[in-house]
């Protein structure tokens, strides 16, 4: 959560869509606040960039298996204000951590320190090794994406920083290239072997749409979110320390499974290439844990493809049933859920007006995504918050979000 916000406070964010359904939210206010801060810190007038957090509707832990995902960019952003320096230093202020740090562009080395500046150091390091010779810069960063909530505040930070550093040095790169460089920086400087989903949607999001991405070819399809359906994100306010190491373990298990099956299915490169029938046929070759991990990924890929057609047809109820299957598979086969996520999903599934609910993102805490009938959002929000708090003693943060546009420059006026 942000500094200065009581994380145990129920935050209910309402957006009146009656007049401007799916329009981009106004950005000037956030940029204006950052402008004042920037002037105080550096006595200069900056340029502004932003990138959004994301929610994934379906397709979890499939991206690093060359599979399919269906995220939407959220109207929650990380803003970066930037102005050039004449030397080779980066001065970075984080409004969320209320902390400043300094980096030397000539002495960036791979590896994790655990400090928030790893994300900035990582992006700068990867951009430079890709051949973008960066100028020094003063930066101030402020984010609305709640940290540790499973809404990908990291990708929003990486992508907005990349955009700012490139533009500040008079370079431009394609959104896909930026997404790939940001993913690499997370591998090398944060040491999480994440897939491409979060950075890709942060770069390519489109207002009012989810995006079905083929994580092997990086081809994507924009899918309008049906009118009358709202994205409700419920943050359980629980986050487990071991999330990142468990994530890397799951990834290794999948790779191990592919190696084992490749002995009988030559030519497979990733779990994307395996069908459920093949998996069943060769089940006895696999250890039971690896088999379960693989069953999740293979079945989840099938669900994403079905879900895309259902969304297109406007069959949100059937889409919601696939979300329920996805959650069960993540809980029982992939084992990345936690009791608080299961409870939030279970409570939501009992509510009138909820089409579907599941955990979203890497798991081990964080948020659920709920597709909710617009006529029921308020009562669902109130009821879920009350029931969850009664059962856990934790006040959740429940947001009704819009699918928003991708990263880029922001004009402050
Ligand atoms: C995290 C990673 C993504 C993806 C999800 C799980 O958000 O950053 O690449 O693997 O977990 O779907």
Image (spheres, helix red, strand yellow):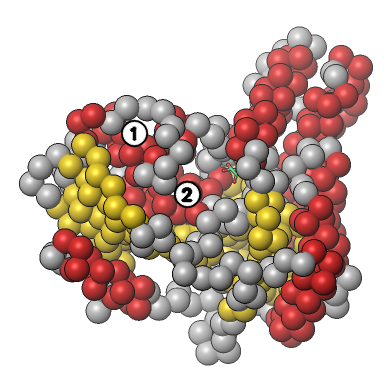
What is the tally of numbered marks visible in this picture? 2
Q: Residue at x 54, y 52 (%)?
A: 152
Q: Say if residue 337 shows up in the picture.
A: yes
Q: Residue at x 36, y 73 (%)?
A: 30
Residue 75 in percent (x, y) is at: 50, 68
Q: Say if residue 313 shows up in the picture.
A: no
Residue 45 in percent (x, y) is at: 16, 67
Q: Which residue is mark 2?
A: 155
Q: Horizontal placement of 296 versus 92: left or right? A: right
Q: Horizontal placement of 104 versus 57: left or right? A: left
Q: Horizontal placement of 60 versus 160: left or right? A: right
Query: Ligand 1 near label 2 (Cβ, under 8 Å)?
Result: yes
Residue 126 numbered mark, or none: 1
| Disc 1 secondary structure class | helix
Residue 309 numbered mark, or none: none
Mark pair 2, 1: CA separation: 14 Å
The quarter of the picture showing ligand 1: top right
In terms of depth relative to the viewer, which is nearer, 120 or 240?
Answer: 240
Name, please, the residue furthest toward the left: 86
Residue 343 in percent (x, y) is at: 83, 60
Residue 294 in percent (x, y) is at: 78, 30
Upstream in the sequence, badge 2 or badge 1?
A: 1
């Amino acid at each position: 959560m942000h500094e200065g916000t009581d994380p145990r406070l129920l935050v209910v964010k309402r957006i009146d869509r009656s007049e401007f359904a799916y329009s981009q939210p106004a950005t000037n206010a956030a940029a204006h606040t950052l402008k004042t801060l920037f002037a105080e810190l550096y006595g200069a007038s900056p340029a502004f960039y932003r990138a959004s957090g994301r929610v994934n509707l379906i397709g979890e832990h499939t991206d690093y298996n060359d599979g399919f995902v269906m995220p939407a960019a959220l109207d929650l952003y990380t803003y970066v204000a930037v102005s050039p320096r004449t030397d080779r230093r980066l001065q970075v202020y984080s409004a969320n951590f209320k902390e400043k740090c300094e980096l030397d562009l000539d002495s960036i080395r791979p590896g994790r320190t655990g400090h928030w500046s790893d994300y900035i150091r990582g992006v700068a390091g990867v951009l430079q090794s890709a051949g973008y010779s960066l100028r020094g810069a003063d930066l101030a960063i402020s984010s609305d994406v709640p940290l540790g909530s499973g809404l990908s505040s990291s990708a929003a930070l990486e992508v907005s920083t990349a955009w700012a550093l490139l533009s500040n040095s008079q370079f431009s790169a394609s959104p896909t290239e930026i997404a790939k460089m940001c993913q690499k920086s997370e591998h090398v400087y944060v040491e999480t072997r994440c897939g491409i989903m979060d950075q890709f949607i942060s770069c390519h999001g489109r207002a009012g749409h989810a995006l079905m991405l083929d994580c092997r070819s990086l081809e994507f399809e924009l899918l309008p979110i049906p009118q009358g359906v709202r994205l409700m994100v419920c943050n359980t306010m629980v986050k487990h320390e071991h999330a990142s190491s468990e994530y890397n373990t799951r990834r290794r298990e999948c790779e191990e499974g592919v190696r084992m099956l490749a002995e009988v299915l030559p030519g497979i490169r990733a779990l994307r290439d395996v069908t459920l029938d093949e998996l069943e046929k060769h089940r006895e070759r696999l250890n039971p844990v690896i088999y379960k991990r693989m069953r999740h990924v293979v079945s989840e890929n099938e669900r994403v493809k079905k879900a895309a057609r259902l969304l297109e047809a406007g069959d949100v109820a059937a889409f919601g049933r696939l979300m329920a299957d996805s959650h069960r598979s993540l809980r029982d086969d992939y084992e990345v859920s936690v009791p608080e996520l299961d409870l939030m999903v279970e409570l939501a599934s009992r509510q009138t007006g909820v089409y579907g609910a599941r955990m979203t993102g890497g798991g081990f805490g964080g948020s659920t995504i709920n597709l909710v009938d617009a006529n029921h959002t308020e009562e669902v929000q109130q009821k879920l918050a009350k029931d969850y708090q009664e059962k856990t003693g934790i006040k959740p943060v429940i947001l009704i979000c819009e699918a928003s546009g991708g990263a880029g420059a922001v004009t402050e006026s």
